[in-house]
Image (cartoon, rainbow, N blue to C red):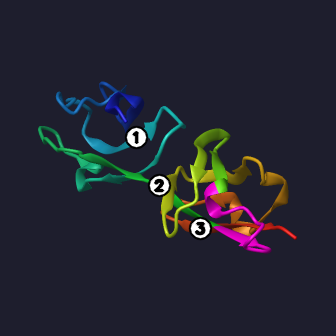
Amino acid sequence: MDPRHFEVTIVGKNANPDTFHPDPEQPVIVTLTPGEYRITERALNEIGPVYVVSYSEDCEGTIEGGETLRCVITNTESFAKIKVLKIIEGDPETSPSIGNFTYSIINNDRLRYEDSRFRDNTFSEIVPGSYEVVETGNYSEYASYSEDCSGTISNGEAKTCTITNTFE
């Protein structure tokens, strides 16, 4: 994500500027009156990955007159992961093969993956938050879903959704 999609806020006496959009090519120099201060950052866009934010030691504390400190804010992109498994129950001679099935993943009210094919032991990255895995195609009416096929997922968490189709 472009660093300009973040906003940095400085809380301190007479901070100038007190907010700005970071630019990695041009560090921002902030002046403030000696005393306590704190520097924080927030993302301006809710769509996309979650970022784990870490701050260097000099992003909070007390500054003395004439002192120069350097605050470094680091954003590490983080996703959740979902694995989708397929079980086909019924007569192997008359039941469709796994190649006939597809699924989609809706993530935070947005279509993240559409008509994906089932692959063994493969995780898909999604943004932490709400998600739902739905079977698509001709056989979706026969699908039943495990508990982890919908719900919420946290930063760094991995879940496995199992979709079962039963043919008699």
Front-lying residue, 131 or 50: 131
Q: Residue 4 location in percent, x, y?
A: 35, 28
Residue type for callout 2: Phe
Tell me the quarter of the image containing the C terminus.
bottom right
Q: Which residue is mark 1?
A: 41
The mark nearer the N terminus, 3 or 2, is 2
Looking at the image, is mark 1 or mark 2 nearer the viewer? Answer: 2
**Does dot 1 land on a helix, a strand or a loop?**
strand
Helix, strand or loop at label 2? It is loop
Rounded to the nearest angstrom, the CA distance separating label 1 from label 3 is: 30 Å
N-terminal-most mark, 1 or 3:
1
* Residue receiving disc 2: 79
Q: Amino acid at mark 1?
A: Glu
**Quarter assignment of residue 28:** top left
Label number found at residue 159: 3
Tell me if residue 138 comes above or below residue 47 in the rendering. below
- Disc 3 residue crowd, few under 14, some 14–19, many 20+, Cα 10 Å: some
Dot 1 and dot 2 residues touching (CB under 8 Å): no
Q: Could you tell whether 167 is left or right of 96 in the image?
A: right
